[in-house]
Image (tube, grey):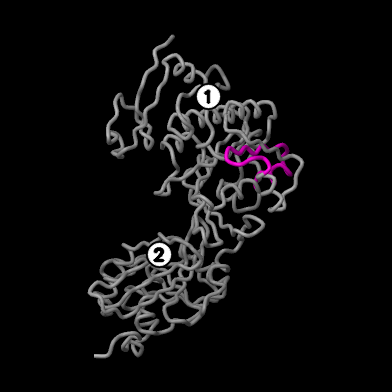
């Protein structure tokens, strides 16, 4: 019998160590080494098994390869297709991650039902729910199709055997961290199990030209659990983002071998499952109280799609020596920079003001193009001055208070005009063509914008300040 070897594997990066240490020498993570035992003979056998069978015995000219049989498969709705790059590529493996309860399983079972109705047999494998629980969810969502097969199993060997017999057009495995291979001597969810399981599924997908969706758990930091090699194995990695208590979700691609990673899909969580939002800008500003101090509209760019987002700010006088700076959906460090610019370059005395910034709808903004909208919302609340309800603000702010240009300005402004906005303030930029129905004001500094939009007459004592 082959001698069993003991080694320690980092659960973050997958690095192997011959002895236990408190800190991984590769990635520097503390308390991440887990003991695992393996046989040299079994390891060699696993290496042979996971090799993807070549389609030819010799190199082939690229011009001689036909791509007629690899056309993309249409998916449910336009949002998912946009994120995937125009459809699902046969033989691809897609990893979908997200926080618990965000709606990953709900979205994928809807995708499975629609795919089964249009393309044929679809297999939905769940290692976390029984078949009865899946049936209850399908009934609640109103799903009914004769070609959707469900299978509750944790053994990946048994799952692969059923996949081989059924030969489905699409396979969904929920989740990769809860299935296990019997010939891998470690617990489910470990680095070895996740890596070997993903490789076996990848082998099946490439051999049978069957697309596979994998659901992945995420860590406390928001990254997909398991080694980073898991994301290197699959063809595409999608994240379902959003606040758990908000109804809107963003499906964002962070890796895609067959398309762009700049696309994003918007969904709304309802009682009947995930519903596509064809015009998210209209939804995000539908409940806006126009003309309220501290409220502005920013035009963001998620991939190739412009989105209009309402930005709210509130300033309140405080007696504390250290005023609060709180942001919901916006980077706090970016907020501190904007507050410093408003104090130094515009002359607003914000040293005794608590400042709160909120991005409406549970959205998260990381693009610098929202700087101008956030800064003006703070100035509007501080001066208790209203901005025009049909005004949008676009621009990045530098440390000296200057406005810097942003990408695809014309596309952003065109989207604003569609939703009824007639005024815009942006950095000086040359547009290829004028935007009909829009009055564009070019400003070079934040101080200039505050003067033009809020006016000099409104620069009075802000509400909430204590009298001298």
Question: 45 or 368: nearer the eye?
Answer: 45
| Image position, residue 198 (x, y; %) | 51, 32
Asked if residue 31 lies left or right of residue 308, the reply is left
Residue 54 placed where, x, y %? 55, 21
Percent from the top left, x then y, of residue 249?
54, 57
Image vertical order of residue 358 relative to residue 460, above or below: above
Which residue reaches farthest right?
Answer: 146
Query: At which x and y percent is residue 411?
Result: 51, 63
Pick the front one: 283 or 358: 358
Residue 125 painted magenta: yes
- Residue 369 is tagged as 2
- Locate the N terminus and report the quarter of the image it occupies: top left
Question: Which residue is at a point 71% across and 42% down the rendered structure image?
Answer: 116
Badge 1 element: loop
Q: Is residue 75 magenta?
A: no
Cα–Cα span, label 1 and label 2: 51 Å
Residue under the image location 40 percent in, 59 percent down: 366
Label placed on residue 182: 1
Q: Which residues are magenta?
A: 111-132
Q: Quadrant of residue 131?
A: top right
Is the residue under label 2 in contact with that under label 1 (CB below 8 Å)? no
Between residue 354 and residue 111, name the one nearer to us. 354
Q: Does residue 144 appear left or right of residue 133 in this picture? A: right
User: SS for tag 2?
Assistant: helix
């Amino acid at each position: 019998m082959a001698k069993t070897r003991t080694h320690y594997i980092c659960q973050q990066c997958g690095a192997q160590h011959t002895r236990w240490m408190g800190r991984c020498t590769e990635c520097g993570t503390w308390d991440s080494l887990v003991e695992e035992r393996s046989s040299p003979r079994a390891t060699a056998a696993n290496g042979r098994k996971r090799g993807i069978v070549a389609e030819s015995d010799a190199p082939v000219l690229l011009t001689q390869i036909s791509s007629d049989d690899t056309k993309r498969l249409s998916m449910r709705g336009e949002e998912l297709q946009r994120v995937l790059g125009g459809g699902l590529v046969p033989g691809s493996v897609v990893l979908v991650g997200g926080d618990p309860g965000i709606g990953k399983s709900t979205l994928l079972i809807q995708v499975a039902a629609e795919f089964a109705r249009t393309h044929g047999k679809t297999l939905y494998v769940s290692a976390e729910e029984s078949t009865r629980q899946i049936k209850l969810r399908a009934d609640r969502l109103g799903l009914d199709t004769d070609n959707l097969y469900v299978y509750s199993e944790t053994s990946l060997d048994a799952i692969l055997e059923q996949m081989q017999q059924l030969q489905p057009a699409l396979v969904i495995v929920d989740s990769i961290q809860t299935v296990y291979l019997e010939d891998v001597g470690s617990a489910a969810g470990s680095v070895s199990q996740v890596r070997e399981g993903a490789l076996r599924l990848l082998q099946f997908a490439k051999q049978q030209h069957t697309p596979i969706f994998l659901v992945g758990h995420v860590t406390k930091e928001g990254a997909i659990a398991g080694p980073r090699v898991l994301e290197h194995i699959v063809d595409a990695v999608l994240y379902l983002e959003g606040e758990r208590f908000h109804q809107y979700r963003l499906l964002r691609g962070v890796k895609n071998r067959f398309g762009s990673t700049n696309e994003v899909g918007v969904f709304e969580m309802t009682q009947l499952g995930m519903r596509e939002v064809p015009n998210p800008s209209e939804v995000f500003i539908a409940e806006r109280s126009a003309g309220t101090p501290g409220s502005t509209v920013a035009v963001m760019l998620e991939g190739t799609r412009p989105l209009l987002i309402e930005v709210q700010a509130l300033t309140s006088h405080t007696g504390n020596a250290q005023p609060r700076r709180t942001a919901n959906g916006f980077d706090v460090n970016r907020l501190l920079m904007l507050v410093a610019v408003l104090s130094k370059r515009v002359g607003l005395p914000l040293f005794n003001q608590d400042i709160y910034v909120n991005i409406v709808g549970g959205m998260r903004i990381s693009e610098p193009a929202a700087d101008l909208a956030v800064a003006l919302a703070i100035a509007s609340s501080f001066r208790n001055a209203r901005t025009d309800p049909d005004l949008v603000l676009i621009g990045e702010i530098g440390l000296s208070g200057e406005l810097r240009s942003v990408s695809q300005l014309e596309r952003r402004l065109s989207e604003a005009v569609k939703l009824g906005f007639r005024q815009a303030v942006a950095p000086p930029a040359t547009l290829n063509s004028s935007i009909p129905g829009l009055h564009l004001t070019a400003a070079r500094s934040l101080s200039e914008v505050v003067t033009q939009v809020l006016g000099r007459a409104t620069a009075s004592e802000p509400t909430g300040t204590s009298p001298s």
